[in-house]
Image (tube, coloured by chain):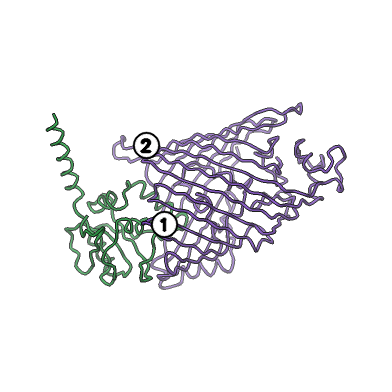
């Protein structure tokens, strides 16, 4: 079992400090500052994976998200979101200022969660959503696009009383050389009973060559010299009485160029990147010849696909006298496919799709959320990862492993 | 048997009305709007619509859902149970999507807040004193 300790460090910027000063020192704002957030503790244990590796239980505590927002005038609002997200520091997740002309035309600037899918803007609202882990598109081990942007135009048009929401966003803080990135989202919300939407992202020509151990930043693998890619797909949510159903599909074609030196490092058995045969074949122009700079295939075009299907059913409580509680069993099916990635996270790989012989895996999750009050959520779930892999004899076979997670969160204001 | 069932249904309906009572939607007396639809009211209270047509920020004023006006609001305006309504607002607050509602403990406190804030909208029991504020019609009815 590993315990993660927390050291509080503030990562700031001049924009952030200006927003903070506005919140704290503006006489108009001071009486209307809203401060709230949540604490959570989380435990995760991975069962024995095929091919070895010691299963390790990981307990993180206490996670804190602290939000501040203030309505400075009828039109202008500012928002700050501090988080201790298992990174041994209290970081600033996002911060922005918003100007509202009317509901149909609003502007936001700063570091902003991108409207994308049902979840990207809501992943910090842990006590409220079904399950513990985010959908695969936002899993930090294989993030498919940058979660934040810098400038957004958005708004609501009301059609028959229901909002049609749109947004256009550019800029990001996570991927370098990607100033021309653009994303959009459009969704229609019918009385909170049915939401249907589509989102898209285009990176422009982007690159992230960093430390070998960097996790893929915004969809770009660290052995790429450059990558021009898009993510597009759709999502829907339906609620019938106490039943919630959520679904989404995303596809991401990459037009990428590999860095031959970096790939050669991956192919060197001494570095321990541990590529499987499919990955070695993919990186070489001629897989019958040794791995040399001239034999590296620098054409790194590939496509990532993912989908999820999620069900939850809220069973209202009330049988315990004087305690109002709610029980929400949930079931998820997640699928993810990335033929380019590798297994070793120390080299920017992904120990889910990268372990698989074909870059694909399915994940089934069964769990329950228990809400003894509206402000507390205890979630317990277990997942089974299913994929094909090469066994010790080099033969391809189907296999699986289990994970269990527990999350307890408490909302405060 | 049928008579007993019919009598029971009528009795339950009467009791429900008695518990919920009649409620009214109120705004600041300077607000030029005189009536809205139920869907518009729900959009304001669920943070989907944030501006009055004149460009003034909507400030929503909630009160305890155990109150007659609070219970009527959940059943007739937003049409959801208290847990779902609270969960919706926790989600909106944690994602920064909307400014949290102002919470007041009684009809009188709601009236005082609405009087003092040009963009405010709240709900109270129809029987409560509401001098100095404007009663909005909802779907063309003053009381609901």
Whether residue A9 sits left or right of residue B105 in the image: it is right
Above/below status of B79 relative to A280: below
Q: Colour of chain A?
A: purple
Residue extending farthest front: A160
Q: Quadrant of the N terminus of chain B?
A: top left
Q: Earlier in the sequence, mark 2 or mark 1?
A: 1
Tell which of A63 and A46 is nearer to you: A46
Q: Quadrant of the C terminus of chain B?
A: bottom left
Q: Determine the residue positioned at 60% across, 55% down.
A: A201
Tell which of A408 and B119 is nearer to you: B119
Distance in Å between CA atoms under marks 2 and 1: 29 Å
Marks 2 and 1 on same chain: yes
- Please tell me whether mark 2 or mark 1 is closer to you in this view: 1
Q: Determine the residue positioned at 66% across, 49% down.
A: A253
Above/below status of B116 relative to A80: below
Give the chain coloured green.
Answer: B
Element assignment for label 2: strand
Image coordinates of residue A9 in percent, x first then y, are 58, 58
| Chain at numbered mark 1 | A
Image coordinates of residue A62 in percent, x first then y, are 52, 47
Tell which of A186 and A54 is nearer to you: A186
Image coordinates of residue B12 in percent, x first then y, are 17, 40
Q: Determine the residue positioned at 19% across, 67% down.
A: B131
The disc at residue A163 is 1
Above/below status of A10 relative to B1: below
Disc 2 target residue = A315
Image coordinates of residue A380 in percent, x first then y, are 48, 37
Q: Residues within 10 Å of mark 2 (few under 14, many from 20)?
A: some
Q: Residues within 10 Å of mark 1 (few under 14, many from 20)?
A: many
């Amino acid at each position: 079992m590993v315990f993660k300790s927390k050291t509080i460090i503030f990562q700031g910027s001049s924009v952030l400090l200006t927003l903070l000063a506005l919140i704290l020192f503006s006489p108009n704002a001071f009486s209307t500052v809203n401060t709230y957030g949540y604490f959570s503790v989380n435990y995760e244990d991975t069962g024995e994976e095929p091919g070895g590796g010691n299963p390790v239980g990981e307990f993180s505590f206490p996670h804190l998200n602290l939000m501040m927002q203030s309505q400075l005038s009828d039109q202008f609002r500012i928002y700050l979101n501090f988080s201790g997200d298992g990174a041994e520091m209290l970081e600033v997740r996002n911060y922005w200022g918003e100007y509202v002309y009317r509901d149909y035309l609003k502007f936001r600037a700063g570091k902003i969660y991108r409207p994308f899918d049902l979840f990207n803007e809501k992943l910090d609202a842990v006590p409220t959503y079904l399950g513990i882990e985010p959908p695969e598109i936002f899993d930090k081990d294989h993030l498919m696009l940058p979660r934040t942007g810098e400038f957004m135009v958005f708004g609501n048009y009301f059609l028959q009383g229901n909002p049609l929401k749109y947004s256009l966003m550019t800029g990001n803080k996570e991927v370098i050389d990607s100033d021309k990135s653009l994303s959009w989202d459009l969704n229609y919300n019918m009385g909170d009973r049915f939401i249907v939407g589509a989102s898209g992202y285009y990176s422009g020509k982007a690159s992230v060559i960093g430390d070998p151990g960097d996790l893929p930043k915004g969809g770009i693998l660290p052995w790429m010299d450059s990558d021009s890619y898009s993510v597009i797909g759709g999502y829907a949510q339906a609620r019938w009485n106490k039943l919630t159903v959520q679904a989404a599909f995303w596809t991401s074609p990459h037009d990428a160029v590999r860095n031959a030196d970096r790939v050669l490092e991956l192919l060197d058995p001494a570095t321990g990147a541990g590529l499987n045969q499919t990955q070695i074949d993919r990186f070489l122009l001629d897989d019958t010849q040794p791995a040399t700079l001239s034999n590296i295939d620098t054409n790194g075009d590939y496509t990532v696909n993912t989908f999820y299907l999620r069900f939850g059913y809220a069973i209202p409580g009330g049988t315990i006298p004087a305690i109002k509680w709610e029980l929400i069993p949930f079931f998820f099916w997640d699928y993810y496919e990335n033929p380019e990635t590798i297994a070793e996270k120390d080299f920017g790989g992904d120990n889910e799709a990268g372990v698989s012989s074909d870059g694909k895996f399915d994940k089934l999750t069964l769990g329950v959320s228990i809400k003894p009050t509206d402000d507390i959520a205890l979630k317990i779930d277990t997942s089974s990862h299913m994929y094909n892999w090469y066994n010790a004899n080099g033969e391809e076979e189907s296999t699986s492993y289990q994970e269990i997670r527990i999350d307890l969160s408490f909302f405060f204001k | 048997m049928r008579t007993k069932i019919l009598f029971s249904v009528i009795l339950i309906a009467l009791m429900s009305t008695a518990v919920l009572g009649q409620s009214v939607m109120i705004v600041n007396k300077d607000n030029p709007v005189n009536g809205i639809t139920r869907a518009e009211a729900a959009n304001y209270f669920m943070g989907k619509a944030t501006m009055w047509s004149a460009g003034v920020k909507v400030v929503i004023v909630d009160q305890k859902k155990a109150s007659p006006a609070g219970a009527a609001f959940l059943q007739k305006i937003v049409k959801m149970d208290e847990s779902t309504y609270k969960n919706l607002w926790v989600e909106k607050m944690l994602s920064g999507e909307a400014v949290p509602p102002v919470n007041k403990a009684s009809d009188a406190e709601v009236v005082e807040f609405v009087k003092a804030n040009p963009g405010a909208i709240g709900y109270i029991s129809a029987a409560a004193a509401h001098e100095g504020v404007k009663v909005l019609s909802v779907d063309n009815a003053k009381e609901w």
